[in-house]
Amino acid sequence: MELTLTNILLLLSSGLGLFLSVLIFHKYGQSLANRLLAILLFLYTLILLRLFLWDLMYFLIIPHFLILPISISFLMGPMHFLYTKYLINSERKFQRKDWLHFIPFILYTLFTVKDLFKSKSELISILNHLNKETVSNDFILFNWVITFHVLLYLVVSLKIIKKYSNSIPQVFSSIDKIKLNWLRYITIFIGAGIIIFLIENTFMLGGYQISEYFGLSNVIFCFYVIALGYFGLLKSEIFISSDFSESVHEFSNLPFLRITTEYEKAKRYEKSGLSKVKADDILRGLLDLMNSEKPYIESGITLNKLAKRLAVSPHNLSEVINTKLNQNFYDFINQYRIEEVKNSLSDPAKVNYTLLSIAMDAGFNSKSTFNNIFKKHTGTTPSEFRKQK
């Protein structure tokens, strides 16, 4: 059979997926999340390779190999979910209850393992019912089961990412490098691919094909592997750093939900045990420390580090900032940084300093973040503010 562009993309993506899985496992394998990512990429490599060989009718030559990756489909959702879970909290060890996610894979493998002992001719006969010309209803219904299984885990993954995104401003003063927007977009992207795969199956059940034998969803799976491998490799070093792990470990026990009303604040902290007198003491100590030692000029300052300086728990410090100042940690710290920048921009001795150097001296580590926060607090850009002075 002649190679198509989809065939070439499947082959290249499977090769790249294998390369990235080996590289991530070898270079960043000390992290459980990265080991899970490497395994996930390897599993997708097998699936993409199977799709490539299947499209070229290789099931007539190596049927035993092509039947193996079918059960792997039950691992796609759980592995994506577990990667997301352990990426966010890299200090966790693999938990016993996580093995429950592999039950569908184990059951299906046990149910179909007998096929591996069939003769080549028997397997070819079975697989022939799944080729382009004679797709069976059973095959399509099986794909539906796989689709909903994966979608369930993708939805849960998105909820975890949303919860994390709402929480990091409570703990970190700089969040650009640790935001998981990239993983959210990739999760949505593969979710869209799974839904397209579901639509392709539904149309095929009625005798129609919106793309030749799942060609559209296959292309999406290829780009998913490329994107996940690339960004996973790019972000690996950040998420295995000791500072990140320590801070995440602290906030893993903090309430995740975004607080928007006084009632919600009261409900959130009603069992904290922090008295009004103690809260006022913490607040005074916090404000004194901010003015005397200026910890906000440290770009890596976190709730955990600041709590240690004050000799209080991160939980109590977070409660004080939320309830007494009506701010999260991120806004609290960056408010001081903006004031530091404004003072520097008004200082004649710093007239020749660049805006970026002033921002960095104040604790910012990103030009775009600095510009956005400055405009949010002052209603003008840093350059416009300087001209006014």
Image (cartoon, rainbow, N blue to C red):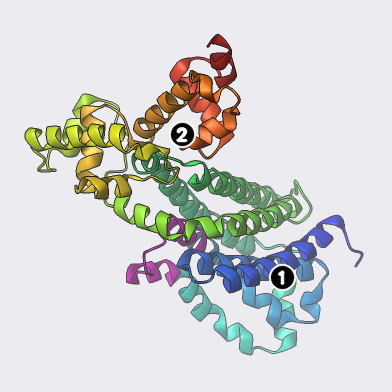
Residue behind mark 2: 362
Please report contact status of discs 1 and 2: CB closer than 8 Å, yes or no. no
- What's the residue type where badge 1 is placed? Arg
Q: Residue at x 69, y 57 (%)?
A: 226
Quadrant that contains the N terminus: bottom right
- What's the residue type where badge 2 is placed? Ala
Asked whether 378 falls inside the magenta stretch, the response is no
Helix, strand or loop at label 2? It is loop
Which is more toward the observer, 285 or 154? 285
Magenta stretch, main secondary structure, is helix
Looking at the image, residue 259 sits to the left or right of residue 78; the answer is left
Quadrant of res 326:
top left
Question: For the residues carrying marks 1 and 2, which lies nearer the camera in this image?
Answer: 2
Q: Residue at x 82, y 71 (%)?
A: 57
Residue that protrudes farthest toward the top in the picture: 388
As drawn, 102 above or below 182:
below
Residue behind mark 1: 50
Q: Residue at x 53, y 31 (%)?
A: 358
User: What span is colored magenta in the figure?
Assistant: 79-103
The answer for how far apart the CA atoms under marks 1 and 2 are is 54 Å
Q: Residue at x 51, y 74 (%)?
A: 108
Asked whether 85 falls inside the magenta stretch, the response is yes
Q: Percent from the top left, x then y, of residue 54? A: 76, 69
Can see residue 136?
A: yes
Quadrant of res 263:
top left
